[in-house]
Each structure stands twice: as structure tokens, then as C-alpha cells.
Image (spheres, rainbow, N blue to C red):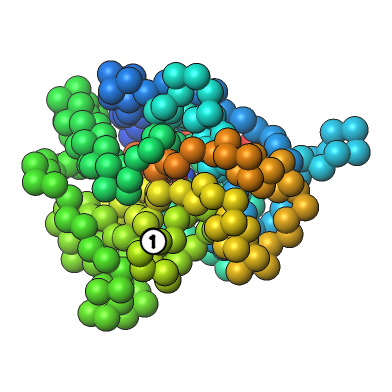
Amino acid sequence: MEALDSYFERLKNPDVESHANIRGRVLRSLQGFMLDAGFKQLMPVLMSPITDPLNHAVYPAEIKYEERPLKLTASMIFHKQLALAAKGHDKIFIVAPNIRLEKAEIKDSQNHLLEFSQFDFEMRDATMAQAIAMVDGLVKHVFKEVQQHCKAELTQLGRTLPSYDAPFPIYASDALIAEHGPQFEKIMSEKSKTPFFVTNYKREFYDRENPQRPGSYNNYDLIYPEGFGEGLSGAEREFEYEQILRRMRELSMDLTPFGNYLEAAKRGYLPPSAGGGLGIERLLKFISGKRQIRDVALFDRSVGTSFLF
Ligand code: ASN
């Protein structure tokens, strides 16, 4: 049982304690920032007839309850939109576990976990620009808190976390593709000295198509510099029934499980909104300067894991 011995051996590394202290500080500062800004915190939903169809193929993660198929949460996207209908829930956030049974094609990814935590938020009547400004402030706040309270941990990890003061730059994906080709995210992440935003990706149906510029999308990613790659994605949302239906059909989606969601949209229960979701392990990885995402967690859920525990 060499794997077992090396698992317990790794736990004795002082880095493991530093990661735990940074994790605690990151979670406290993420949640504190949002509560201070008047957001309401929700508990995660773990199973539902619907979940995020995602922009890439994963193995289905489903269970059955009394013959009814339920999906394990891939992201809280639809529940965020629905929660905004509740009284006083104009701005919400959730620390939510997400299950994504990734395929072997990405088993060498340094950035994917089969099970991870997402810091997800949504704001009623907000625009993409407002969501981007929120994320800019939130991420800078977390970095500052870690710099102030986790000096010993950063030293232990050999990490100098840069300070960023200027607003993170915002680029449009079409301009970056013209300059760097389809690998623009990787190229830009490697050469950038600061986190930056990229807007306008064609992806899931729920990210809003720009009504003034069909074929453009009011969505965005936050990309970390130094080659750490994507850390957050978000968008304005589709909320109008006809538009949702059109976008779903465009992607040839099976509409059956979405009956209640579509009906809610038809009856006007989905408010206009914008939001986003930040991968907590990816943020920890960037802050700690670790290259492998499994290094910031105690239990290995990377794509090639042997599921020791
Ligand atoms: N949470 C993301 C968002 O708010 C969606 C996702 O994780 N796929 O846009």
C-alpha cells in the first residue's frame, strides 16, 4: 500500500497547513465582502431535475429518488435565477459543491476537479459591467486580506502574491482571437502580469445574447496571469421565455426536464440578472502559486484520481 503511505506522508508537509490557513482566510473574506455589500447567503442545492448542461461533455451524474431521475449539481445557475424571485433576495451568493464527471481527454488538466467548490453570485437587474466591477472588487479584497493575514503561509509556500491596484483590463474575445488565434486564453494568461477579463464567448444558452448585436454574448471570464488560466465565468442571463427556448433549440437540447423552468420563464418569474461563479480551488491555487489543483485539497478529486478515499 505505497499509495496509502505516500498519502499520509504528504499530510505532514507544512504546505498542507498553510493551504488550510489560506483557505479559511479566503472563504472568510469572500463571504464577508458579500455580506457587507448586502448580499444574502444561500445554502447549496445538491440534486434537482435540472442542472447546468455545461459547455462541454461530461459523464452524467444522476441518482434516482422513487423512480424520479435527479441530477447532481454541476452549477447553481438555474437555482440562482430562481432564488432572485424570493423577497429581499436581490443579491445572493452561495458556496456550492459542483460535481462534473470530466472525461479522460482532460485527465492531465492542472485546473479541473471532478468535485469542486464554486463561489457563485447573482444580482437582480444587473448588467455584465456591474458584475465585472463586483468581481474586480471582490478578488482584490481577497488578495489584500491574504497578504495581510497570511504572511507566514505565503513565505512557507515561497509565494509572492503581487498587489494589483488598477482595474483588471477587459478584452473582447474576438479581438484576442484575431491577435493570438484560438489559444488566446493560454497565451494571454502566460504573458499577462495581472488578472484580466475576457468578454463575449459563445457557450451555454443561459448567457445572454446581446440584443443589439446578435451573435455577441454579454458574458465574461476572469483569467489569472502567470499561466494559471481561467478562474471565473459569468454573464448577464437570458430570462425571456422565447429567447431561452430559441437558445436551447439552437443547441438541440432535450427540453423535457426543463418544463418547470421554461414555464417559470413564460410566466415572467425569472428576473433579468447578471452574476458569475468563481472556482475556489483555482483561486487557492493561484494565491498559493501551486500548479496542480489537487495540491490545494486534502482529498484528490483530479480527473485521473484513483479515489483513495
Ligand atoms: N456559475 C457560472 C455562472 O454563474 C456558471 C458555471 O459554472 N458554468 O455563470
Most foreground residue, 113 or 264:
264
Q: Is mark 1 within 8 Å of ligand 1?
A: no
Q: Name the residue under label 1.
A: 210
> Is residue 105 visible to the viewer in this orientation of the structure?
yes
Q: What residue type is labelled 1?
A: Asn
Is residue 282 placed above or below 297 in the rendered structure?
below
In the picture, measured across the screen, residue 1 lies left or right of residue 279, that is right
When the figure is inspected, residue 142 is found, relative to residue 78, above or below; the finding is: above
Quadrant the C terminus occupies:
top right
Give the quarter of the image for residue 135.
top left
Residue 118 visible in the current orientation:
no
Residue at the image position 18 percent from the left and 66 percent from the top: 191
Answer left or right for 234 relative to 204.
Answer: left
Name the one closer to the observer, 165 or 16.
Answer: 165
Residue 298 lies, in percent from the top left, at 49, 34
The residue furthest front is: 267
- Other-residue count near label 1 (Cα within 10 Å), few / some / many at <14 / 14–19 / ≥20: some
The quarter of the picture where the N terminus appears is top right
Identify the residue at the far right of this view.
67
Q: Element type at marker 1?
A: loop
| x and y, in percent, of residue 229 in the image | 33, 58
Give the percent coordinates (x, y) of residue 153: 24, 29
Q: Residue at x 27, y 42 (%)?
A: 130
Question: Is residue 47 found left or right of 291 in the rendered image?
Answer: right
Horizontally, residue 262 falls left or right of residue 239, namely right
Q: Name which quarter of the figure residue 102 lies in.
A: bottom right
